Image (cartoon, rainbow, N blue to C red):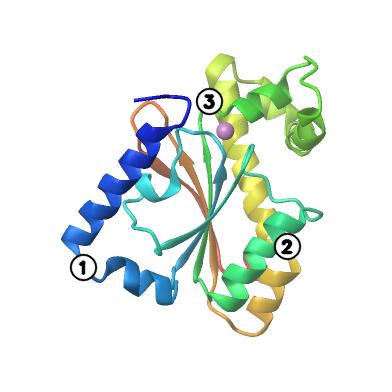
Amino acid sequence: MSNDTLQHLLDNNRRWSAAKTAQDTDFFRRLARQQKPQYLWIGCADSRVPANEIIGLDPGEVFVHRNVGNLVEHTDMNCLSVIQYAVEVLQVQHVIVCGHYGCGAVQAALSDEDHGLIDNWLRKIQEVYRTHREEVDARQGSQRLDYMCELNIAAQVANVCRTTVVQNAWRRGQKLCVHGWVYSLKDGLLHNIGLSIDSPEQLPC
Ligand code: CO
């Protein structure tokens, strides 16, 4: 086995494809015809938070967008295009913004160190911190970081809700709920942070 050619990954893939087909002979043929996921997942790029795997869904069952810090920026054409496609074409009924405790992006945003280019991306997390500085700084160590992770998720849920795509969907009467979840790296469990917004009236200010 040569690591140079990544042959081990290609071998894994062949075994995976064969196992899927053995379970369900029509699996790939059916998926190749169309995708009909009911959920859009917006999560952190962290390798320890693989969307499909932690919610037990197969290929075809969740539309996924991941970036560093699970941010939803109103100038990010990539993320906005994903939301538009998911809401308008796939007609998903649920958008899940999933962050995680111990998020390196949130940690980096809280530190004064220079991380290079990525600091521009993390600036939005710093804005969340500045808005809630007192409550955040009232906490220590990992509790401070974890609380910031939750606040960041709440901010991104609000950002999803404020996109023209979601606003227009609600105006049309389309059923769409935006949820905020946080994942714990320590035990693999997801927690609902009590945020599920399905109408503009539910948006906090
Ligand atoms: Co992260």
Looking at the rendered image, the disc whose residue lies closer to the viewer, 3 or 1, is 1
Q: Pointer 3 and pointer 2: residues touching (CB < 8 Å)?
A: no
Q: Relative to 151, say whether 33 is above or below.
A: below
**Residue 97, percent from left and from top:** 55, 51
Residue at 77 percent across and 37 percent down: it is 121
Judge: label 3 CB < 8 Å from ligand 1: yes
Residue at 73 percent across and 62 percent down: it is: 162
* Three-letter code, disc 2: Arg
Report the residue that reaches farthest toward the bottom: 172
The residue most toward the left is 22
Q: Amino acid at mark 3?
A: Gly
Q: How many marks?
A: 3
On the picture, is 25 further left or further right than 109?
Answer: left
Q: Residue at horizontal 23%, vertical 61%? A: 21
| Element carrying mark 1 | loop
Task: Identify the disc placed on residue 162.
Answer: 2
Earlier in the chain: of badge 3 and badge 2, it is: 3
Residue on which disc 3 sits: 102
Relative image position of residue 155 (x, y in whole percent):
67, 47
- Label 1: which residue? 25
Q: Kindly report the distance in space between the C-alpha atoms of the residues bearing marks 1 and 2.
A: 43 Å
Q: Residue 50 appears at what percent x and percent y?
A: 44, 42
Identify which amino acid the numbered label 1 is placed on.
Thr
Q: Nearer the viewer, mark 1 or mark 2?
A: 1
Quadrant location of the C terminus? bottom right
Q: In what quadrant does ligand 1 lie? A: top right
Compare marks 1 and 2 and give the one earlier in the sequence: 1
Kind of element beneath mark 2 = helix
31 or 146, nearer to the observer: 31
